[in-house]
Image (cartoon, coloured by chain):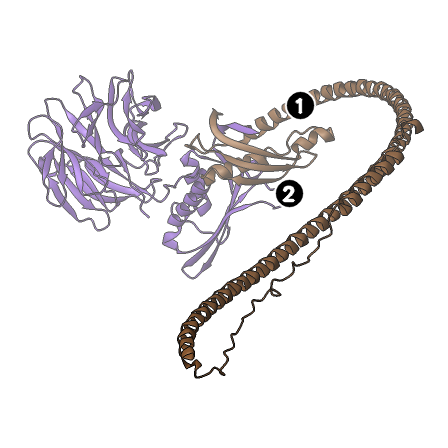
Amino acid sequence: MKADKPRFGLPAIVSIGIHLGIIILMIMAVPTPSYRLKPSASENQPIVHAAVIDSAAINDQVQAIQNRETQQRAAEQQRLRQLQAQAEAARQSKLVEEQRLTQIKLDQQKAQQLAAEQTQVEQQRLAQLKVEQQQQAQALAQIQKQQLEVQAKALALKKQQEDDMAAKALAEKKRQEAEAAKILAVKKQADLAEQQKVLQQQLMQQQIANEHQQLVKVQQMQGLIDQYRARILMAIGKQWLIPEGADPRISCVFTIDVTPAGAVSHAQLIHSSGNAALDRSAETAIYKASPLSVPKDPSVFEQFRHFTLKMTPQDIAHNS
Amino acid sequence: MELTQGVNQAIPIAISPFSGAAVTAGKDQTLDVIIHNDLSNSGQFKIVSIGGADYTLQGSITTSGANYSVSVQLQSAFSSAAGGSPILFKKVFQVKKTELRQLAHTISDLVYEQLSGVRGIFNTKIAYILRQWPAHSAPVYALEVADQDGFNPQTLLVSSEPVMSPVWSPNGKEIAYVSFEKHRASVYLQNVHNGSRRLISSFDGINGAPSFSPDGSQLALVLTKTGNPKIYTIDLASLNLKQITEGYAIDTEPRWSANGRSLIFTSDRGGAPQIYQYDFNNGRTSRLTFQGNYNARASLLPDGRSMVMMHRENGGFGIAKQDLITGQLQVLTDAGQDESPSLAPNGKMVLYATQYQGRGVLAVVSIDGRIKLRLPAVAGNVQEPAWSPFLT
C-alpha cells in the first residue's frame, strides 16, 4: 500500500520555486520612474539700447547746426523711427516673450499634468501589481491549502479504508456469528414446532372426541328440551279456557319462573293482548298447569327455570 | 315458546254462600244463588266447588236498619309462590232491600266482565207477549216486561185483542209494538216507566213489525199501502213516511244494522222466505241467505259480522247464526218450534220462543250454541220475546 502513496514532495517544491522566480522577475522588470524637468528659457531675455545726444554744438555750426539740426531732425526722425521701430521691435519681442512664457507655462502645466498622469498610471499599476501579488499569494495559499487538503484527504481516505476494512471484517464476523445463531434458532424452532404439532394433533383429536360427545349430548339435550317444551305447552293449553269471542290475532306474553320441582313460582305478564280477560285466562292456565313437567337433569332444567311464553287464542278445541 | 291452542270451555268458578246476614231477594233466593243462576245461565261459567274452581267469589252482608252493606271479592284459585292468590276485585255496596236483586245481577256483571272480557247483561230486561186463557172466557193478551232471568214480570199492556212484535227503543225507555185493539193493527210507542203511549201508525191494512233506528229517531215498519206488505220508515217526530222496498213480494220483519246504514228484512221475492239486505246509501237490495228453505226474523249482532234468524232446513224451525263474511251458517237450536230470536245487547245470548209441554215458553241459547236453558215458566203462553238494550 505504501507504494501507492503519491510523491507530492518534489513537484511541490519545484512548483513553488518557479512561481517565486516569476514573481521576482516581474517585480524587477518594472522601470524606476524619473521625473526631471527640462531647463527653462528665461535666461535669454532681450536687451534694449538707448541713444545719447551731444548738446555742445556750435552756432556756426548753426547752419551746420541747422543743417545738422535738419540733419539731426531727420536723424531724430530717423532715430525716432528707429526708436519706434525698436520700440515696436521691443514690443514685438516682449509679445513674443510673453507668448514664449505662456507657452512655457503651458508646457510646464502640460508636463505637470503628464507627470500627474504618469504618477496616477504608475500608482494604478502598482495597485494592480499589489492586487496581482495578493492574488498570487492567495493562489499560492490556495494551492498549498489544496495540497494540504489533498494530503489530509488522502490520509483520511486511507484511514477510512483501513477503518472500513476493519468494520467489514467485524461485520463479516458478526454476520457469520448471526448466521450460525440463526441456523441454530431455526433448527430449535423447527424442533419446537414439531413438538407443538404433535401436541396439537393430540389435542385436536381429544377435542374432536369431546365435541362429538358434546354434540351427542347437546342433541340429546335438545331432544329432551323439545320434549319438555311440548309437554309444557300441552299442559298449559289444556288449561287455557279461552274467553268466548277472543280475537285470534291478539296474543299476550308471560315470563314464567319455575322451581326445579316444576312449580310455577311466578308468571309475569310482560305484554298484554289488550283484552284483560284473555290475559287473565292465560295467567290462570299457567298457574293451573303447575306443577309443570320439567327435566330432572339440572343442566337441562336450566332451560326451563325462566322462560317466555307467548299465548295466542288461535285454535280452540271444543271440550265437552 | 308459543302456545296457540286453548279450549272452549265454561270457566269453573266457585260461589261461596255469602256470610253474615241471611237475606233473600225475591223467590227466596239468596244473593249467591241469583249470581249462581246468572253466571250458569250465561253459558260462560260452570259453578263448581272450591276444589275444582279457577276463581272463587266470596261475599258478606251486614245490615244496618233498612240498609244493606254487601262486600264481594273475586279471587284467583291459583297463586304464585311470591304473590299469593291474586284478588281480581273487591267491592263494597250499600243498598236497600228492594235493590238487593239488582245488586246480585250487578255482581254477576262484574264477574262476567272480569273473566270474559265482555259486558254483562244480567241487569237488562226482556219484553214478551203473554197469552192467557182465563176459565170460560176469551183469551187475554198482555205485553210484559221482566228481568232478563224472567223474574219480576210487570204488565205494560193488557188487551183482549192480539198484541205482537214488541221492540225496545235504543235508550230502553220505550217499547214499540203492534196492537189489534179496535180490530185493526196499529203501531204504538209506550213508555216503560209511566205507561204512557203514542199511536205511531194506523194505516189501512197491516201496520206491523216495528224496529227502531239505532239513534231512536225512526221506526222501520211494514205497511200494505200499495197492496203487498212493504218496508217503510217513519220519522217519530214528524211521522213522515218513506217507502223503502217495492214490488209484489211480501217484505217484512225489518231490522236496522247497528251503524244505521242498512236494513235486513224477510222477503219471499225468491219464492220462499229469505233474508235480504237493503243499503240506504245506494238503494240496492241483496240476498243474504241461501241455505235452508225458510229463513226469517233476522237480526244483526252488535259487530255487524253475523246475524241470527229463524231457520228451517228440513222439517222443524230452529235458531241459526250466519257469518255474513264467510256465509257459514251454524244452527244454534233445532227443537222444531223455535222462533222469534232476540239478541242480548252484548251479542252473547239469544232469547227465543219455543214450545215446552204444549205451551209457549222462553229459552236462551248462548251465541256459540253451547248452552240452552228455558226461562222460568209462567202461567200461559209466552211468545215474541224482545231483549232490552243495556239499561245502566
Quarter of the image where the N terminus of chain B is located: top right
Q: Residue at x 66, y 56 (%)?
A: A119
Question: Which image quarter: residue B110?
Answer: top left
- In the image, A162: left or right of B40? right
Residue B279 x, y percent position in the rendering: 20, 30
- In the image, A292: left or right of B253? right
Report in which chain the residue with disc 1 lies. Answer: A
Q: Residues within 10 Å of mark 1 (few under 14, many from 20)?
A: some
**Chain letter for purple?**
B
Could you say which is closer to the camera, residue A120 or residue A183? A120
User: Looking at the picture, do discs 2 and 1 lie on one chain?
Assistant: no
Q: CA distance from mark 2 to mark 1?
A: 29 Å
The residue under label 1 is A222
* Hue used for the chain lettered A: brown
Q: Residue at x 62, y 65 (%)?
A: A43
SS class, disc 1: helix
Tell me the kind of residue under disc 1: Gln
Compared to residue B386, the image places residue A80 above or below, namely: below
The residue under label 2 is B81
- In the image, A49: left or right of B379? right
Tell me the kind of residue under disc 2: Ala
Residue A8 x, y percent position in the rendering: 87, 34
Report in which chain the residue with disc 2 lies. Answer: B
- In the image, B117: left or right of A265? left
SS class, disc 2: loop
